[in-house]
Image: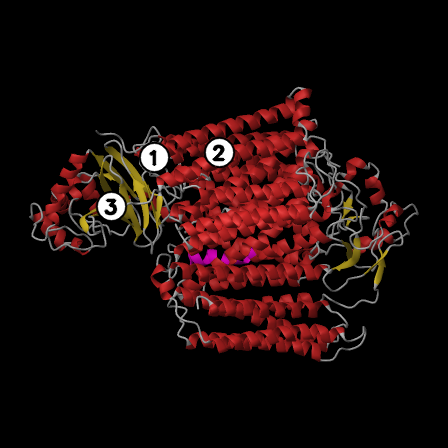
Amino acid sequence: MKSETGFDHELYRLFPTHRPRPPGELEELEKAWERPRGWGMLTAVNNNYVGFAYVATAFLFFLLAGVLALGMRVQLAAPMQEFLSQETYNQFFTMHGTIMMFLFAVPAVEALGVLLLPQMLAARDLPFPRLSAYAFWAYFVGGLLFFASLFVGLAPDGGWFMYPPLTSTAFSPEINTDFWLLGIGFIEISAIAGAVEIIVGVLRTRAPGMTLDRMPMFAWAMLVFAVMIVIAFPSVILCTLLLEMERAFNWPFFDPTRGGDPLLWQHLFWFFGHPEVYIIFLPAAGMMSMMVATVAQTPLVGYRLNVLALVATGFISFGVWAHHMFATGMPRVATGYFSAASMAVSLPAGIQVFCWIATLASGKIRWSTPALFVVGSILIFTMGGLTGVMVGMVPFDWQVHDSYFIVAHLHYVLLGGMVFPMFGALYYWNGMTSRKALSERLGKWVFWLMFAGLHLTFLPMHLTGMMGMPRRVYTYLPDRGFDTLNLVSTIGAFILALGVLLFLVDLARNFRFTTRDDAGNIYGGGTLEWLPTGLYSVRSIPLVRSREPLWDDPGLADDVEQGRYFLPGTATGLRETIITSPVNAEPQYLQLMPGPSAFPVGAAVFTAFFFLSLTVQAYAFGVFSGIIAAACVLRWVWETDRPIQQTTADIGAGITVPISITGPSSHGWWALNTLLVVMGMIALMGVFSYLYLYGIHPEVWIGAPDLLQTAGIAALLALAFGAAWGSRELLAGHEAGTFPGQAPWMLAMLGAALLAAALYVDVTGWQAAGLNPKASGQGATVFALLALQGFEVVTAFIMAAYLGYRSGRGLLTAPTNVTLDVVARFIGFVALQGIAIALLLRLFPG
Amino acid sequence: MIEPLWGWPPPVLDPAGPYAEKVTVLAWALFGMGVAVTAIVAAAVWVAIWGPPGLKRKLGGEKAVWIGGIAFPAVVLTVLLVWGLTLTASLTRDITGEEMRIRVTGEMWWFRVEYLDADGSTILQDANEIHLPVDTPVVLELRSADVIHSFWVPHLSGKKDMIPGRTTLLQVEAREPGRYGGVCAEYCGGPHALMGFVAVAHEADEWRNWLEARLPSEAATAAAQAAGRGQELFMDSGCGACHRVAGTEANGLAGPDLTHVGSRLTLGAGILPNNRGTMMGWIGDSQSIKPGNRMPSYNMLSASELQAIALWLEQQE
Amino acid sequence: MESGFSNRTDWLAATLAFMIWAAHFTLAWTASIVFPDAPVARWIAAALTLVSFAGLFALWRWRGVETAFSVAGLGILLAAGGVAYDTVPALIG
């Protein structure tokens, strides 16, 4: 194999090593990874703990949303019932959908990633453990507070998709809608934080020798999942912010009387919303691929076909969003494109299903609870996918759109494509976190009750929809003919719930959380997560030579445990993992990882409080929470990027690598790149909104300020970019160990100031030209983009000030420094984004 | 011909016009495809687990994935795509301008109906009921007065959303006389579940008679039917502020037009049969029938007052 | 490692192929809403399709793809299929 980084592959022959390990090496490793005691457990950042808590919380939301569904089904069991009032039902169905999609489905697969990925890749943890902790706590606190809105009658009631104008102030004057807009906002932050972790984790922390071609399918699925989140979530972040600005400040993004358009929301929402369901499905498909190989006791058939299917789905799913809008009267050809892409996107799903079937055929199935869930999922997901093809056909969709047929379709694909695989996964990977195995006997009952319940509940709904029952109805009339069908669905729902209840019984009786003496590899899987582990993950990081290392090398587990591979201890006495190259996983450097800290928890809690204070209009407490959250974040990052004495480390067999590097190869650089893509996508969606509204209501457009002013803004931003670039250059001019002077950070601060100046000219220019954000769609979108820029400018100031403080404390190491890189690149990006936006808004339409 | 508005067979599979017929054919084909592919996949899973070794071997390689997962779906999907797009085009043929036009505006939570002449002016106002002649292409101009609604009468065609700030168009045509139920199919808050209407198709001359019987009352000089205690109570209770009855001082536009309410099949937007009892109940306490609707309950009126108003409205045909 | 699928795993080719599909889709869709119900939108779509096929072909040659039974080959074919599907609406109706 050609070397990707210049690493000599001959060195791999040194492993497994043969000399006995020095005494105390294991103890030192254990000490570095020791868990905090007592209440300190809340500050844990180890993925064993954070991942478990994350999965448990997601499952809790599944149960809560499921109970809401049971309430809904009781209400619908017979016509014109009054079990739930109209208002309560409307809140219930909105919360059921919102919680399932935002607080259960995406976090659950992200949580399984946090829990399983490091072990599957034989990394000691994810690359940014405190970021995972932050993401989890923000989700936990915020999610529970959001759910609590039900108890005070303030839960949102506009449907999980919250279409304006129903959700605009005129028709939803109460703060219920704001609960959704601001409550879900921080969930989105949590998801993006997780996505950054997973991209960098999957691409840079794999065990040496684990080329992309040998990566577990779940890792591939999570990589595509995370990239999709980075592209799709900004759209919903933006439209959520726009609707909140419309409600709070009366900026008419979606008000057609002032140049806005309700369909703008739908485009922005569904550009996120459709990829969202594939974001939910792909990781579960990845888990299916791994479980099916183990239950058939043979490697997955069509590994590369399957990966290609994941990548193809990832791309094409971004081209189908307006199939949720077939009935809105879009131009015919435009409508057709989405139908065509919807047909196309089902093909890769078919590839995956046949890979699974072929795997079952090429092996010999060993029946178990996970095997039942795997086979059941294939059938259910196929049925759901086929009704998906049906509704991808425009004329058919025109009949069944917004009817119970769609309810049937979506539950078949989500239950078959995600929930059933998830239950299979909970049984399958249970042995990694529990001292005892779950019960196979109960497991069979769980499966069959859930399987029967699912069909009994949702199969009749195909018919109910075709009989004319629309969605999102709190009751129906007795003359419609679907009384019996609804009753059957309700009975089915309770059978499904009984299955879930039985699972809870199984958990209560058998699940005992542990991080060391776990039940182990009950089903005989072949991938690395089944190596013996402690809190430090594996004792030594193996050299990977195939896709199922445990099947191909029966001695691997013992060798790893005895420390005969990479990094059998800790080279610096701190927590570490090896950073490897993205394609061939060649070792590049040693990453020092942080330990437990209270600051991510504090930041998360106060972030949640910040958003929720704005919702209930407690602005003073909101400002206070925001300041505390920001302070916690700064205190948290204060501990990062510390110079260390040791510059290289022995990662095993005498191979030495640098400790922490700076520049484009560093994992921090990659994380910032991902964040910049997110920011860029938000701006891009804002620009799309501007152009879209211009297309619909050009009559409200006024002329732009004059060209000279535009040139001035561009010049200021170019100077800002220059200042940022200059600060890095200045630092690079100094030798290591010397104090670089005040100039580098002051240049960064100058860059931030220039950004602010450019923004000031921009805003005042538009105001002078007569643009009013309340008066027109143009005003609203222009000022929204300026507000976005403004938020980023404020962030740039805080970052530059922080940099100055670090410089003052002598932490600005020459010739390169991670913190300076982050600040300078951030400022540079904001400058470039500012130029692009300013030019576009002012030169178009001219 | 009296037939139930809903029920069996399922309206999506029981077309009463050319637009719905073609979709029903597609629906059956899609359903057949779905059952067939599910059976194939189930059979494949069965063979994979319990099949004879020879078959298992064939199924257990990448070739099976290429055939089952790529070639076969590609063929099926291409055929369906071409069919679907062709059908879409034929259901949305360019509008010639010769078609009959009816404007339907979605309101929270009822349907305002206006019959338009060739110039686009309103010749007749109604609510929650649409009358069409058979074998005549009709273009529905769909609008919304507030939030997004959707117009769906499954026996006659697919649905189309009613979006504030826009007019969307839906082409329908009935082949047989009859009464067909419709609903709002986009969540519009509150009692969205109880927002419906009826589409009535007549033979051509019967429809002309129906229209001509109603036009005179629209004329400025017409007077309402049977003025008396009922009309007095109607006016004194302030009903005219929201409801129009042509030929009286009542000309409110916020609520459904009641000029022809006596001949309507339903009340409350498709949810109650229209008779004196339901009319009294609706006026007296519409909030307990359709909670959240924009008409307050007139529970201060006595039974005899309600009866008088209902009697009077019954006469407004 | 696989029977059937050639040994070279060229993820760059597959990713670039799908980016071509994405560009085709985005531009064709934009044209269809900037010029709603106008023939020029169909002409633009047709032109974009030809350019996309040319691009995919050029990609095939540039990366030295030998057979469809490879990551790059199937990736480019799937992307081409996607482009073809996305052209049908511009041709029909």
Viewer-nearest of labels 2 and 1?
2
- The percent coordinates of residue B18 (x first, y second) are 31, 34
Asked whether, in this view, residue A622 is left or right of residue B254, the answer is right
Say if residue A443 shows up in the picture.
no
Chain letter of the residue beneath label 2 in the structure image: B
Q: Residues within 10 Å of mark 3 (few under 14, many from 20)?
A: many
Magenta region includes residue A175: yes
Asked whether, in this view, residue B62 is left or right of residue B102, the answer is right
Q: Secondary structure at mark 3?
A: strand
- Name the colouring of the figure: secondary structure
Mark 1: amino acid: Ala
Mark 3–mark 1 distance (CA, rounded to whole Å): 19 Å
Q: In front: A736, or B23? A: B23
Q: In front: A381, or A728? A: A728
Q: Residue at 35% across / 59% down in the picture?
A: A256
Viewer-nearest of labels 2 and 3?
2
Residue B101, disc: 3
- N-terminal of the two: label 2 or label 1? 1
Asked whether, in this view, residue C81 is left or right of residue B315, the answer is right
Residue under label 2, please give it: B79
Magenta: predominant secondary structure element? Answer: helix
Residue under label 1, please give it: B20
- The percent coordinates of residue A252 (x first, y second) are 39, 63
